[in-house]
Amino acid sequence: MRSRMRFDDVAWEASETISDSWVAGLFQPDTLRSIGDFMIKHRSGVPTELCQPRAGTFNVSFRMKFDDGGSALIRFPKPGTTMFPEEKVRNEVATMRYIQAHTSIPVPFILHWGTREESPLGLGPFILMEFIEHAMDLGEALNTPTLGVEDRPILDPAVDVEKLEMLYGQLADIVLQLSQCSLPRIGSLVQVDDFTWEPGHRPLSIGMNELVRLGTLPRSKLPTSAFETASEYFQALANLHGEHLHHQRNDAVDSADDCRRRFVARRLFSRVASEGRLASSRNDHGPFKLWCDDLRPSNILLNEHLQIVGVIDWEFTYAAPVQFAHAPPWWLLLEQPEYWPDGLEAWERAFEYRLQTFLKVLVEREETALRRGRLTPEQRLSGPMRHSWENGDFWVAYAARKSFAFDVVFWKKLDPRFFGSCAIAVQDRWKERLGLLSEEETRCMEQIWSIVRLFG
């Protein structure tokens, strides 16, 4: 049984082709000169060097050094991998300015930003910001030393406990501060004036980007506005899982039974969502919490003393249901559960062990914040995080956000929770649940298989 849904390889190749071609064009002398001139125009000082561009998954960055010892960084979304570039940049600018105004989390200072039309040579929407000097990122500091650059990162199993507590403690402070940012709706931030932000747009998530890029989901199927309640948002996410199965054109399923198993999982998850059983009734109408899909160690910058000096890449940040903020950070192990080499249960055992360390230092940070008057007892995060892990809410939030990882989480964690224990093997459990479908749902299941098999 293949639990994790694969990316559409045809879509992935097309995405990479567009992205690689665009990046290659950046190395033309005239292009580099235009980018450099643009940066100099918006950052005072005498320039000394334009460094080679650096490409991540979603962006390409250029760094310009100045004789005052500082640097500026201009960042463009990559065509082919970023499906909503203008929206992404607009959201990130509003988020970074909100975080600067409401927390002490170190984020880059924005010098200038604009649309594609305002960019050098029309390269795309951009953010020009001060570069944060750093020695390494947190992912490098925690990764297993024997792993290579091409390997997926995994927390060093032999990491020194004091070092881990020191780094986890700084992470705990960041997560704690974000959890104190309360907002009235679910959505991406809009800056209304110098002192006011509100969730005025749909919550643009990394999952939405990837569903369009690698799941061939039509853009018309995505949410178009902010949400007033958590239950509405969970229902929207459940609907996206179903639409994903319906619309991915390649590599979605292995067989008729594989398609049926995935359909049953999505239909049952949607049913639970429609019954309001995924959202917390206490917080259904808010307040909602600021949540960053891409907050992880590789986006956290350290100096040579292993102190956090910057947190970057806030583009997929939005006000989200409180369950998201109350779930312990999956990235404590660096690797996602669906990619763990020995399977979900092995990830869970390793995670629980490290979670105790994280919760220990989180409590310590809470106590310090309480003494300094920066936190009230009701704002403690350690209790809700422990509860989320112990009662399984962690897996509800994870499955709701992760369409490609949904199946493995649903059958191993959510099916027993919502539909009772079952002695049947996980790969065959869907057959036991077929009786829960209506005749119309069963017909829809077979129709989807007839569509999916046409595209292989």
Image (cartoon, rainbow, N blue to C red):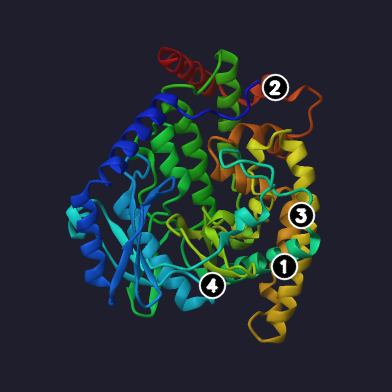
Residue 385: x %, y % from top left: 71, 60
Residue 359: x %, y % from top left: 76, 63
262 in relation to 396, above or below = above
Q: Is residue 432 visible?
A: no
What amino acid is found at the position of numbered circle 3 in the picture?
Val
Q: Residues within 10 Å of mark 4 (few under 14, many from 20)?
A: some
Mark 1 or mark 4, earlier in chain = 4
Determine whether 441 is above or below 85 in the image.
above
Pointer 4 and pointer 2: residues touching (CB < 8 Å)?
no
Compare marks 1 and 2 and give the one earlier in the sequence. Answer: 1
Dot 3 lies on which element? Answer: loop
Say above or below: 136 vs 398: below
> Which residue is label 3 attached to?
159
Q: Residue at x 30, y 58 (%)?
A: 126
Q: Are marks 1 and 3 in contact (CB under 8 Å)?
A: no
Disc marking residue 105: 4
Residue at which label 1 appears: 166
